[in-house]
Image (spheres, coloured by chain):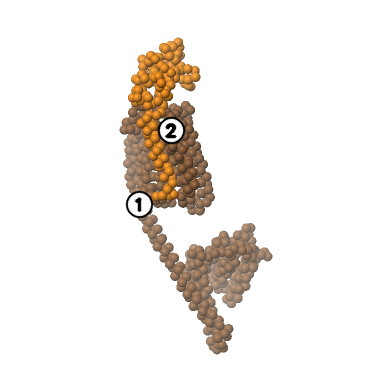
Amino acid sequence: MTFQKHPLLYILLPICIFAVIASFYRFMVAGDYVVEYEGACDPSTESCFVGCTDDECTEAYFYTKVQKSAGTVLSQCGPDVTDCESANVCLPGEADCSVTFCSADALAEDETCVTPGTLEEVLEEQGMEMEEGEGGIDEPVAETEL
Amino acid sequence: MICPFFEEPLYFFYVAELPGILYYSHVPAIVIALLMGIFILKSDHKALINRLLFGLCISFSLWTLSTLILWTNIHSDVLLFTWSFLGPAAAFISVFSIYFTHVFLEKRDVSNVLKGVFIALLAPILILAPTAYTLSGFNLVNCDAFGFEGVMNTVYYPLLGFIAMIWVLALLVRGYHKAPRGSKSQVVIMGTGIELFLFSFFTTTFLGSYLTTSGFLPDSQIETYGYFGMIVFMVYISVLIVRFKAFHAGLLAAQALIIALVILIASQFTFVRSTSNLILTGITLLLTVLAGIFLIRSVNREIEQRKHIELLARDLERANKQQIILIHFITHQIKGFLTKSRNIFSMALDGDLGDVPATLKPMLEEGFKSDTKGVNTIQEILNAANIKSGKVTYTMSDIDLKKLIEEIAGDLRPAAEAKGLELAFSCDTQSLVVKGDRVQLLNAFKNLIDNSIKYTLKGSVTVSLAKDGDTVRFEIKDTGVGISKEDMAKLFTEGGHGANSTKVNVESTGFGLYIVKNIIEAHHGKVWAESEGEGKGSRFIVELPA
């Protein structure tokens, strides 16, 4: 089995092995990627996105959009971001982190915004009730840094 | 990280809430492709075409298994690691399809330049698989990475799929035109199979990814329908194996097909819910297994018989070749002896050996005639053997057929008149030019006219020549012994004597009309005979392109 006879195998096999190892290291070991999830939001003090807890959309919850480095979230919260306060905020000096509150610019199609002054009005308009504890993935937190 | 809104799968893959079609499309496709690939590789692991088909099946199985993991797993690291190889797997499917088609059509490996092109197409997607050009993040809410796919996943591999479809199509069109007549249907079967697979696979995966990313669809479930394309392709491959013995697979193909069918029916259990449907599916499965066992046994029997027949055919061919060599040897030797003896008779008759007593002269003449007939007979046998072994070459030139037939008729008229027959020739034009080998055509027409004279005991032989549109029609009609229906079937065959022919013409070799047919067909013409039966004369017609 010479290189002349099987150039595809000789060139592509090492690249394949390299790609598998590098990909395994990046995603499985280093957690070198961004995760996006819904962070907790308090509609009485912040501008939040409104989500539904069921298909009929009778109950509402409020959230921000959080993007964080997976490695950081893993070290702060473990594999589950639910019930992890640090997951909802960007800590000082934290790289690759953003928390997006609801605004006209951030609003996508089929999404609704709620601000402290419009909470009751929006809920009434949509025919929704507030969920108990009404946070996003977590309970509402006191401070949120951008 | 785990997706908080999704439940952990049972036994790694099973999630009750997922649509049944997901398992029905994934599981059979993975198993069928894997089984087929392994069976074909096992049949002849040294054949490049088998290795390429195996590579194609493995790439597809890896892709499909990966997408099943993406549908069921909830760990972002596992999902992204798996997702990062969807692009390379799809790129390998594209390149293996092109490479496979090349080798299937050309029956040999591709050039090193083309291998370089394949490497150039695959290397970027492999090298960039672990980078942000492929994937940069993960959405824990939707449990997918559609919003984080880089240029390699959104543009490069769908484009490569499209290129593969066009490339394979172009190869197939060219291959179809170049393929010999007997192989064209193989090109059509393989081509239809691979194009259906590529089209359904790349179109649905591209649409699934594009429509989900752009928000038109909640998920990429549409792509699951594309996997049925692989099953269709495998069915086409099985047809090639069963009908044309492709990939040297034989019985393995039948086994693979039955196993695939069983898997396909068994997969229905993943979405069948009512008791009656469960019972019906169970019965169908049982019947399929039983029928499958019978089918495999009968295919096995047929394959054994076919092998036996092939062995016999090879032996027969070998014996035939040896026979031809023997005929050549014997006829050449005998022809040499007869020629020598004829020359001695000729010299004696010409007076070259001194005065010959008058009483001896008739004997010498008889000897000379007998030897001449012997040489001609041997020459006829040699001609037939040469035609059969394909040794005859034709030197084409413009020939005036009218002149040629007149010449032959002139030569044979004394023989006809000696039997008290009238030999007439008519032609309605000045000249009739055809393209052909003069020596061979002369041999063919002489044979036909000579035959009519030999088999006509009284009456006449009428030869006519005419132009009919783009063809020249030669016709010879006699009032001879005629041809029975039974003899008509043997007429132009090798050594095909009629039941009564040897009674009329004891010197018949049975090769004359066989030679005529071969010569006429080599000139893209046709020859046939007509007769109302024994004792009612016969008619031989030759049509040649003008």
Q: Horizontal placement of B169 versus A43: left or right?
A: right
- Where does the image place residue B431, in percent across and percent down from the top left? 66, 65
Chain letter belonging to callout 1: B
- Where does the image place residue B453, in percent across and percent down from the top left? 56, 72
- Where does the image place residue B388, in percent across and percent down from the top left? 49, 64
| Chain colored brown | B
Residue B26, quarter of picture? top left
In the rendered structure, find residue B131 and report the number of the disc placed on it: 2
**Residue B34 in sight from this viewpoint:** yes
Residue B32, quarter of picture? top left
Type of the residue with mark 1? Asn
Does A27 sit above or below residue A114?
below
Instruction: Give the camera-side residue of B153 and B183.
Output: B153
Q: Colour of chain A?
A: orange
Identify the residue shown where x is 34% and y is 32%: B14
In the picture, the quarter occupied by the C terminus of chain B is: bottom right
Label 1 sits on residue: B300
